[in-house]
Amino acid sequence: MNSQQIIQDHDRWRKGAGGAPAGLVGQADSHAYTGLDLNEARFEGSSFSGSTFSATTFGQATWSGCHFTGCTFTGCDFRAIAIQGCTFTECNFATSIFDEGSFNTTQFLRCRWDELSFHHSRWEQVLVLDCTGTIVRGDTLTGEHVDFTGSYFEHLAFNNVRINN
């Protein structure tokens, strides 16, 4: 079964219209998705190139060992997502929520972040290298071994944050 079918089946399952829970393992994807419910979806060792997600929810999803290149995420809700060992290269994130998310051994390389929130999130070994953006917020964010080398954000608002402490 191809990646698009697995993702759409998960959306149908979440909406009570058939389908099945997504376990996307070792797949490749380059499709556009809008308005999907991908809460609790599991992506492992998959590659996304040029994929677009808009108005999609990824609450309590688990992503591990995935690679995202040139992908766009707009108006997405990533609340309580767990991301481990993933790399995002030249991806765009806009008006999205990562509150209560967990990021481990994750890299953001030359990405764009606009209007994102990371309230109550946990970061461990996160690289945010040569990234840019506007309005990035985080209250009670904690992180160790976090590197923002070469990144520039207009209006970075972190309150009660402990990074590399």
Image (spheres, helix red, strand yellow):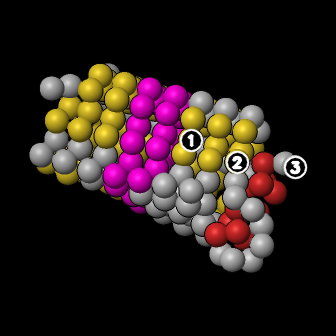
Q: What element carries label 1?
A: strand
Task: Pick whichever, 127 or 66, lies toward us.
Answer: 66
Task: Name the residue furthest right.
Answer: 1
Give the residue number, with chain letter if any, for mark 1.
63
Give the residue number, with chain letter if any, for mark 3.
1
In the rendered view, tell whether residue 38 sits above or below residue 16: above
Q: Residues within 10 Å of mark 1 (few under 14, many from 20)?
A: many
Q: What element carries label 3?
A: loop
Label 1 amino acid? Trp
Q: Find the distance from the CA under tag 1 to the CA under tag 3.
A: 19 Å
Residue 16 screen position, x and y as percent: 69, 77
At x 34%, y 52%, the residue is 100
Label 2 amino acid? Gly
N-terminal label among 1 and 2 = 2
Highlighted magenta segment, given as a residue range: 80-107
Q: Find the distance from the CA under tag 1 to the CA under tag 2.
A: 10 Å
At x 12%, y 46%, the residue is 160
N-terminal label among 1 and 3 = 3
Tag of residue 23: 2
Q: How crowded is mark 2: few (under 14 residues within 10 Å), some or many (20 or more)?
A: some
Residue 163 screen position, x and y as percent: 20, 31
Label 3 amino acid? Met
